[in-house]
Amino acid sequence: MIKLKDVSFTYQGSDGNNLYDINLHIKKGECVLISGKSGCGKTTILRLINGLIPNFYMGKLSGSIMACNMDISVSPSYKIAEKIGMVYQNPRSQFFNIDTDSEIAFGIENLSYPRNELLRRVDKTIKDIGLQNIMGRGIFELSGGEKQKVAFGSIYAMEPEIYLLDEPSANLDTKCTEQLRQRLKLLKKQGKTIVITEHRLYYLQDIVDRVVYMNKGKIENCFTSKEFFSQSEEKRKRLGLRGFDFSLIDIQNNLLSKETIFELQNISTGYGKKVVIQDMTIGASQGEIIGITGHNGAGKSTLAETICGLRKPISGQLMWKGKPISEKQLLKLSYMVMQDVDYQLFADSVENECTYGMDNVEIEKVLNTLKTLNLLEFREKHPGTLSGGQKQRLAVAVSMICQKKILIFDEPTSGLDLEGMIKVTDLLKKLAEMGKVIFVITHDYEFITEVCTRVVRIDEGTLSFDLPLNINNKNEIARHFICNSLESEA
Amino acid sequence: MKSMLKIGAKNKGLLHLDPRTMLLLLVMGNLAVFIMPSVKGEILLTVMILILGLLCGVYGFSFKLALIYFAFLGIDYICMTVFNSHLSNYIALFVRFIRKVLPCGMLGGILIGTTRVNEFMAALSRMNIPKSVLIPLTVMLRYFPAIGEDTKKIKNAMKMRNVTPGFLGFIKNPARTIECIYVPIMMSASRRADELSAASVSRGIENPLKRTSIQEIRFRTVDAICVLAALLYLIFIWRI
C-alpha cells in the first residue's frame, strides 16, 4: 500500500538532512505506529506519504514514494486527497469552516460529489463517529475532544484508503482517548491502512500491528507490536518513550504541606450568569503542586481564569494569607502559562520580553532568572524562534521577574516526549522549592504521578475529589485515568 | 431522504439569501451611498438594511449599528444647528464620514453573519471565479471569527503582565497596546494560515472541478424580491 524507498529529505533552509535513507513498506490493512523523541522526523514521514512534501513544504527530496499505486511526488494534491486522509495534531488548525456540519462536508465538497452523495456520506459519518450531539454547532464552542471528533469525521467522510494521524491524543482526556481508540478499531475493521505518530502510547497496545522507532531522522528499529510493548521499563526509558502501562507506575508519598496561604471559598464562577463552576472550595499552600483534572469541557479553564483573577467569581470569596482579596489584587499575584504560549510573548528579544511592560527592572535580576532557566544563551533571540519548551520557560521567567506567587500551567506536557516531560517536571519542582503555589491543568497521568502533591478532580463543574497524592489514594486517583475498556464499550 | 444534518442551524432568521444575492446587494448598497441625494434617502437605506438584517436573524449587530447610525445623525444635527462653530463643524464632518460608510458596513456584517464558508465558496465557484481569487477570499471570511478568539487570549495575557488592554490602556500607552495586540495576532495569523492551507490542500481544495455544496444553493423568490426592492430603491433615489 505504502512504499518508501531510499527516501532522504531536507527542509528548505535547514542544514543537514531531516530524514535519512528511509525504507518503509506498509501493507494494506496494517496499522503502523511511528514512535520516537520529539524532532526525530515522525511528522515529516506523514507529510511525505500524503504529498505535502514536496507539493507544499519545499525541500530537497530523493528516493521514491509510492502509495495506492500513485507516485506521490508527481501526483496532483486532489488525487492524493481522495485516497489518503490526514488528521492533524491540532484540530483547530485544520478547520476551514466555522460550523461543524460544513466542516465535515468540506473534503467531499472539494472532491465535487453530487449533493445526494454528500448527504449520504455526512449521515454515515455522523452515525459511525457518534457526532449527533455536536452537529450544527460553531467550532469555537467545542471542547478539545469534540474538535478532534469533528476533524476525524471530516476525513472519515472522504472514505480514504489510508489514514494518517499526527499525535491524535495530544489534547484529549482519558475518556476521549478511549473513544479515539474505538474509532481506530472501526477503521481496522473496515480494512483501512493506518499510520499514527504518537507520544502517548498506552492506548495503542492492542491496535497497532507494527512499531517503527525513529531516531534523528533515521529508522532505528522495527518491532512487532508484541515485541515493542513487552520491552522492559528500563529499555523504554532509554528509548525516551512515554509509559506503556499505567498500572506499573509507582506513586511516592509526598510530604503533606504546611498552612494554607491561598484559598477559594465556596467559589461559583462562569460566563455572565451561566454557572460553570459551582460552590468550590480549594486551599493551597506554598510549595504545593496541585493537579487539576477532569473531562474535556468540565470547567477547568474557567476555574484557572478565576484563580488568575481574570474572571470575577459570581459568588464566594478569594482569600490570600487569611484575608479576603479582590480579583484585581489576585491578578497581580498570579500568572498563567498558557497552552499556546505564543499568545503571551510580545517583545522582540528574550531579554526585552523579561522587562516588557515593567518599569525599573534590574538587569541583574533578569540575567539571573534567565540563567536559572537555561535561557541565557538565547537572550538576543526573538521569542518566536524558540522551541516550545524554551517558550514555556521564557513565560515562567517573566512570572518570576514579576514576582508572581501563584502559577498556573495549562496542559504543559501536551505533545511532549519523555525527555520534554521530565524537563517540565524539574521546572515545576524548582518553582515549588521557591515557595510558589502551583496549579497544573493536565490529562497526563504519568506527569501527575511525577510532579503533583495533590490532585483535584472536577466533574461537570463540581469538585469530585481533592486528594493528596500518596499510596493510599493511588487507586482512587488512577481509576479516572486507566480507562476500563469494558466499561466504555458498555 | 431525511438527513440528520441540521441545515440552516446558523440562520436563526426567517430569511436565508443566496450568497450571490448578498454580494449583489452589497454592490448596490455601495452604489446607493455613492449617488445618495439626501439624508432622507440615506435614512431609508439604513432602515431597509436594518429590516434585512433582522429578517436574516442578525439581531444584535444590526441593532447596534443602526443605533450608532442614528446617534451620529443626531450629533451631526446638533453640531450644525445648535453650536455651529468651527470646532463643531469639524466634529460634524468627522461623524458624517463614518456615518456614510455605516450602512455598507452593516450589509457586510450581515453577509459574514449569515453565510457559511462552504456556501460562499460554492456560490463563487458557480460564478466561475478562479480558485486563486476564491481561496484567499474565503480564508479571510474564515479568519474574522478567529480574530475574536485570539484577541481574547492576548488580552488575558496582557492583563497578567499588568499592561492594561482596551481603550484606557490605548490612551495611556498607545504604542505598547498596539504592539501587544498586533504582534501576537500577526504571528498567530501567519501560523494559522500556513496550517490551514496545508490542511485544505490535503483535503483536495486544489481540485479543478466545480465545488459542490451540502447546502442547496439557488436563487429563490426571496432573492428576487430583495434584489427588486433594492433596484426600485436605486431608481427612486436616482430620480430625485
Image: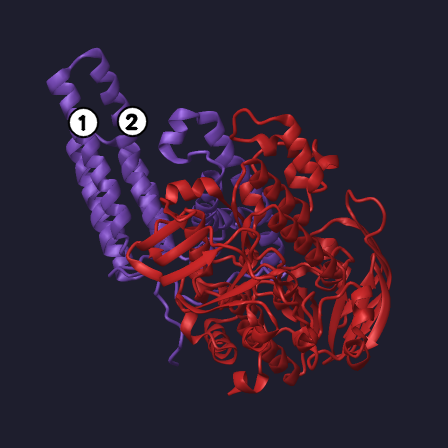
Chain colours: A red, B purple
Query: Tag 1's secondary structure?
Result: helix
Instruction: Classify 10 Å Cα crowding around label 1: few (below 14), some (14-19), many (20 and above).
Output: some
**Which residue is pictured at 57% across the width and 52% down the height?**
A287
Q: Residue B23 or B163: which is nearer the viewer?
A: B163
Q: Pinpoint the chain carrying mark 2.
A: B
Q: Where residue A353 appears, x then y in whole percent?
A: 60, 34
Identify the residue under disc 1.
Answer: B75
Q: Amino acid at mark 1?
A: Ile
Relative to residue A233, is residue A292 drawn left or right?
Answer: left
Task: Locate residue A89: give its quadrant.
Answer: bottom right
Relative to residue B143, is residue A311 drawn left or right?
Answer: left
Q: Residue A164 or A90: which is nearer the viewer?
A: A90
Q: Quadrant of the N terminus of chain A?
A: bottom right
Relative to residue A449, is residue A105 drawn left or right?
Answer: left
Q: Where residue A109 appears, x then y in whole percent?
A: 52, 65
- The answer to whether residue A109 is visible is no
Of callouts 2 and 1, the N-terminal one:
1
Q: Amino acid at mark 2?
A: Phe
**Which residue is pictured at 45% across the width and 51% down the height?**
A262
Q: Pinpoint the chain carrying mark 1.
A: B
Identify the residue under disc 2.
Answer: B97
- Is residue B230 depicted above or below B215 in this figure? above
Q: Where residue A308 appears, x then y in whole percent?
A: 45, 48
- The span from disc 2 to disc 1 (Cα, nearest Å) is 13 Å
